[in-house]
Amino acid sequence: MIIKRFKAENFRNIEKCDIEFSPGVNLLYGKNAQGKTNVVEGIYYFSRGKSFRGREDKELVRFGSEGFRIHLEYRSDMGDESLEYAMFGKERLRKKNDYKISKVTEMIGSFKAVLFYPDDLGLVKDGPEERRGFLNVAASACYAPYIKYYSDYKKALENRNCILKMMQKGLPIDMREIESWSDSMAEYASHIYLFREDYVRRLTKYAGAILKEISDGGEELGLSYESSVAPGMTDRQAVKEEYRRILTSSLDREIAAGVTLFGPHRDDLEIKINGKSARSFASQGQQRSIVLALKLSEGEVIKEMCGEYPVFLFDDVLSELDERRRKYVLSEIGERQIIITCCDRGECVGFTDNEIEVSGGRYVSSYR
Ligand code: ATP
Ligand code: MG
């Protein structure tokens, strides 16, 4: 997948831009607060259907304007494609290949990108929530129904938690209601479990080899999916039954806690380095290498499952990597397209195919 062009109007600090990208390595460079991440945010919007900075759409509107428009042209195995999104007050306009589409779910799924940005560096050391977030984003790029199962699961979880809170307070409830939510949760959880199991198995295949290569053969990576259900189950009905059994048998504890204690919302991705918990023992450099290996592997799994590489968006993380790892990222490109942002142009000398100077929401390209 290759981005050819990104256009934006009144998006963040960009009044108007029209940026062309090359295959290979594209560098957006410039001082702080000039609009480098804003471009990455605009591009990635088409991959997730929302901003990765987790804000509401209206925050994306340039100060003093009424709305914004973003437009992406890219080449995929399907041919030349385009996506457009605009908001103006309460109005939303979405287009795919110049045809209007109504739902955000129709917009996402066709353009695939892997984002690596500074917050990701916490993936190893931070709590399980970060790693679940990684699994959710990565798995939803590979399995189309994943998002729907996950959002249905979350709704059922909220409802079940509401009832548990009532029970904790001694309020009267209809037992059939909690049983019905437990059943829904077990159903959705079984799908999520199987997707995550499959995803982690595929990811492991690549991540170990990549880590070995960027660490000069020194480090051994271990990844395992930790869930309430035993690992390695493959029969969905059996997984569902297991979730039901867990939810039923732990009801007393859950009433006391007032929340659901078991299920995919409590899962983790355990990361080991040389046989030891990376969360407890990995050094700063090792953490960075692991996250880099995970991100590159995320792209490999997309290639394996969808037939082509996603676009790699590296926002401000290159300076965090040492020379060796930086070279690995920039030189072993093959057919991949990479868009990198950094302040110091010198960090990428000799590796770029296109360099774009960013200043005050303006973009000036110099092809090499
Ligand atoms: P850094 O190197 O620090 O990461 P950057 O070039 O990536 O900088 P961006 O995050 O792309 O910077 O852009 C930040 C600029 O955009 C800031 O000056 C910020 O005030 C401005 N900005 C953010 N949101 C809006 C908005 N809605 N309207 C106008 N300007 C905005
Ligand atoms: Mg930035």
Image (tube, rainbow, N blue to C red):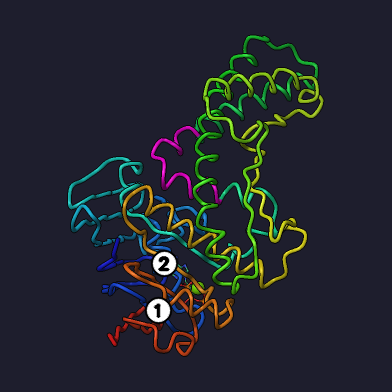
Q: Is 304 placed left or right of 150 in the picture? A: left
Q: Amino acid at mark 2?
A: Val
Magenta stretch containing residue 291, yes or no?
no
The numbered mark at residue 28 is 1
Magenta stretch containing residue 137, yes or no?
yes
Q: In terms of image quadrants, where is residue 126?
A: bottom right
Q: Give percent across and percent down for residue 173.
A: 70, 12
Image quadrant holding the N terminus, namely bottom left
Q: Give percent across and percent down for residue 303.
A: 37, 54
Residue 205 in view in this figure: yes
Circles 2 and 1: CB atoms closer than 8 Å: yes
Image quadrant holding the C terminus, namely bottom left
Q: Nearer the viewer, residue 228 or 129?
A: 228
Q: Is residue 281 above or below residue 223?
A: below
Callout 2: CB less than 8 Å from ligand 2: yes
Marked residue nearer the N-terminal end (2 or 1): 1
Q: Nearer the viewer, residue 249 or 216?
A: 216
Magenta residues, start to end? 134-149
Q: Is 114 placed left or right of 174 in the picture? A: left
Mark 1: few, some, or many residues within 10 Å (few <14, many ≥20)?
many
Q: Is 217 placed left or right of 28 in the picture? A: right
Magenta segment main secondary structure: helix
* Residue at x-position 34% and y-position 70%: 334
Q: Amino acid at mark 1?
A: Leu
Residue at which label 2 appears: 40
Q: Is residue 184 above or below residue 136?
A: above
Q: In terms of image quadrants, where is residue 168?
A: top right
* Residue at x-position 77% and y-position 62%: 281
Q: Give percent across and percent down for residue 137.
A: 49, 49
Mark 2: few, some, or many residues within 10 Å (few <14, many ≥20)?
many
